[in-house]
Amino acid sequence: MKTRPDRHIRPLVAALLMGMAPHIMDLPLWINLWCLGIWSGILLIDVKKWFLPPRWLWLILVVIAFTAIIASARGRFDSDSGIGLLCLMASLKPFEIKGHRDRMITLFLAYFMVIASLFFSSSLGMTVYLFVAVLVITGLLIRVNHPDMGLSPGLRLSIIIVAQAIPLALILFTVFPRIQGSLWGVQQKKTVLTGLSSTLYPGSMTNLVANKAVAFRVSFDSKIPGSSELYWRGMVFQMFDGKGWRLDPDPALASQLPPGESPVRYEVILEPHNERWMFVLDLPATFPVGYDLMADYTLMAKEKIIAKKRYGFVSNMVHTAGDPEHWDNRSVLLPLKGNPLAQALARSLQGEKATPQTIVDGVLSMIHNQEFYYSLDPPLLGKDPVDDFLFNTRSGYCEHYASAFVFLMRAAGVPARIVSGYLGGEVNPYGNYVIVRQSQAHAWAEVWMENRGWIRVDPTAAIARERVETGTLQLGLGNMDQNLVDEGDGGFFKGLGKNVQLGWDALNFLWYSKVVGYTAQSQKRFLERFGLSLSTLGDWIKIMGLATLLMGCLTALFYLGLSLKHRHKIDPVVKNYLIFLKKMGKIGIQRLPHEGPQDFAETASCKRKDLRPDISGITRLYILLRYAGKNMDKNLLRDFKDLVKRFRP
Amino acid sequence: MDRPFEDIVDRVSQVIYGKKKQIRLALTCLFAGGHLLIEDRPGIGKTTLAKALSRCLGLEFTRIQYTSDLLPADVLGAAVFEQHSSSFVFHPGPIFTQVLLADEINRATPKTQSALLEAMEEKQVTTEGQTRPLPKPFFVIATLNPIEQAGTYALPESQLDRFLLRISIGYPDREAENMLLRAGDTKDNLSVFPPMISSEEVTRIRENVKQVHMSDALLEYVQDILDFTRTSPHFHTGLSPRAGLAILRTARAWALLDGRAHGLPEDIQAILPYVVGHRLHAADSFREYTFDKLLGLFREVPVP
């Protein structure tokens, strides 16, 4: 039997397209081409009024799609293959649409495809798209059910329906038990992750210089500290192999906290970097819950961070004397061979009266006074990189300085180590939080001093300002104000673009910290604010009951409003006519229930000839408003109300 | 606003004195695209009414007198063998006209009755496997003699339902009778009637009738009326949805005849007894209600 495409095929295909759109970037190219090809085919058949291809062809396509997806999955059937299969089957769905039930199934399939995109992304942009897609698909659902309703009234109705669902969604969002971890163990889509690496060689950090990607965002509970104080501690390098630095392979957990004062509370939203380390301000003031605080005061997650991570922390901005974590032997270890000139220089710094402080000062003043340059494009270093840098090239990036400095310290017998992380950050004026980018990666040094503990020394900051290459000031030196001035100089449009970018970033930040980051803990905190505890199952049942009650009330209110609105709609005309009838009744002229307006006007006018003009005027307008379809005419209604008001029998 | 078709009513009144309401109802029925049943005795002016209407509207007119020996072929036409062409040629029956007066339809056998009634419903005739459309507009005025019942076949309810309106003309009042007697037989006047509008215009007016606005309040009124006949103990069976549509259709035409583009409760009240009179029966006796009784019953439905 030859059949034509369903008469609603166009809105249905449009709905499926809306559903597939968010997956385009995640799907293999052939699936995209397949879906678009099949859909344009069926639309062409519809436009040209051809018949649908025979059923066996459709079955063959189903088999091909299945085989192809199994072949491309290579035995690993994950969420990607699932979505691919979903899209392939959705592409063939239009062929078998016959009745209303099929149309409904297709539309719900489109909804499902839209929702499935949450597997991969919960970003604000995607959420905005989801909203739009749900609006459009609901509009198409209305169109399929009410084909005579225009496109824009249908869309308006869809907006109203979705808007009405928002309060219920908000209640469910705040109250429904939060399931920890990602849904069904589905991972967020892996992307190419950039960030600091676990080794530090001269030049290993320079590849981050031009990287404007965001490393993490921080909001502070109090005033944001100055950018030169924002040393974001990530890793500590202890092991030197003659050229570069490595992480401690067997780090110990911290047993005590470093002493300090002037604590700040802040919250970090860390972008995934596929490593365990997290970033905290120098120096931690609390033991974290759920993470490890290491003996070198770095913070480690229990597992690799593959999705955005949100954590709150407290740090002391001022380091006071004393340090419970004593240095161990590894902090003075150097290879026996290599870098002889640097070793000699270190020995020359050791004297009778030399203290760690004088050695540190000596090296810093050497960097400041001699011809040391700060450069993003330093020359390559030779076999003895420290010697080469200190006595030959004298030009480098932060890791060159940190590395050379720590080498000299250790050679002079002062325990020292390299800390890497980020320095500074850009304050987003729209959200009052700090954006830390990959380009702000930094490395600095820490030296051990008796009775004072580990002291932070930033050798890069010792370089004389005039020897810092222009345009690179913000890099590694993290001057926020400078940063903004530099970027803002690019003319009006660049400034505007920057502002739009910052505004969008602020919205995203809000989205992640308030919506995506609404975890079970935040839910507990939030509900406790209203005096609702969440410790036992009974509490949960109580809260769910409360939510059900709340939603019931909302629904009841909605219906009440609906009926009020409905009553209001027929009110003004009928109400005023009843007023008129009441006034007539007062002078003894009653309308019989079966009397139409014209008949009544006639009988009433016969009884009171003097009122004839008034009565006929009111009746004429009443008939126009109530029976001639002019009930939307505001002027007419006003005149009618006026006439009835002024009618004094 | 003036009544736009009053000149037609006036002209027809020149041959049927004092029956403006009936003329208007007949015109309403024609414009609403329905068929008219006139229940009255002979000699009241049924034929004159039909003839005068068709002449004024420029429509073709035929009359069939129904008798018990009338056959369907006598109404619809038949294929006749013609010797000179040696073939059967269809000779259209009297039904191929625009206005058909079917006189005393209850005298014919049910078979012949239904031949006409089917043609009325479908506006086409099928004989010997061939379907031929009837002219447009096609308007049937059927008459029934309510007094003489001997040798008649009463129309079943389902067939009566095909007529949009049922009216009776009734005796003229004294003044009209006087005029009639003075003027003598008016049939001769008919031949000099010039058409006042064309049949194309009739088709156009039928389209206009469909455009008459019936407000929600009015639909509610019609529904209340339908509900009333279905729930009230006065009626044997309530009105069908088709009857509801008939009420609306007739009220639209009536409003148009009154020069309005929107219906009023008064329109519905005016045509209601004529639309539902042959569709409703008393619950106890299964008789039809008289006109006045029906009017009184429907007063129980308030205008919303």
Image (cartoon, coloured by chain):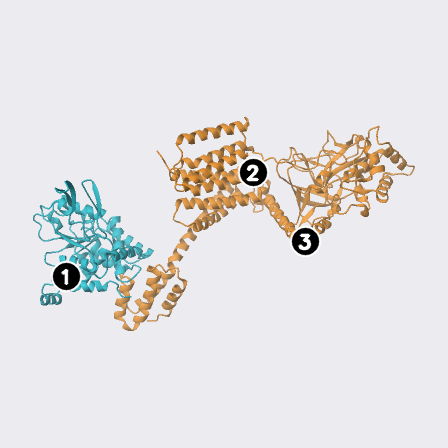
Image quarter (top left, top right, bottom left or bottom right) of the N terminus of chain B: bottom left
Q: In the rendered view, does A188 fall on the left or right side of A211?
A: left
Q: In the rendered view, does B295 fall on the left or right side of A310?
A: left
Marks 3 and 1: in contact by CB < 8 Å? Answer: no
Pointer 1 residue: B191
Colour applied to chain B: cyan
Query: Looking at the rendered structure, which numbered label has been put on residue A25?
Result: 2
Q: Which amino acid type is marked by label 2?
A: Met
Q: CA distance from mark 1 to mark 3?
A: 95 Å
* Local secondary structure at mark 2: loop
User: Seen from this angle, which residue lies furthest top?
Assistant: A75
Pointer 3 residue: A491
Count residues near mark 1 (Cα–Cα under 10 Å), then give few for <14, some for 14-19, many for 20+: few
Q: Tell me the subunit letter for badge 1.
A: B
Compared with A493, A590 (above or below) is below
Residue A111 seen in the figure:
yes
Marks 1 and 2: in contact by CB < 8 Å? Answer: no
Same subunit under labels 1 and 3? no
Q: Nearer the viewer, residue B261 or A519?
A: B261
In percent of width and height, residue A583 lies at 33, 67
Q: CA distance from mark 3 to mark 2?
A: 34 Å
* Residue located 88% across and 36% down the image: A345
Count residues near mark 2 (Cα–Cα under 10 Å), then give few for <14, some for 14-19, many for 20+: few
Q: Tell me the subunit letter for badge 3.
A: A
Query: Looking at the rendered structure, which numbered label has been put on residue A354?
Result: none
Chain painted orange: A
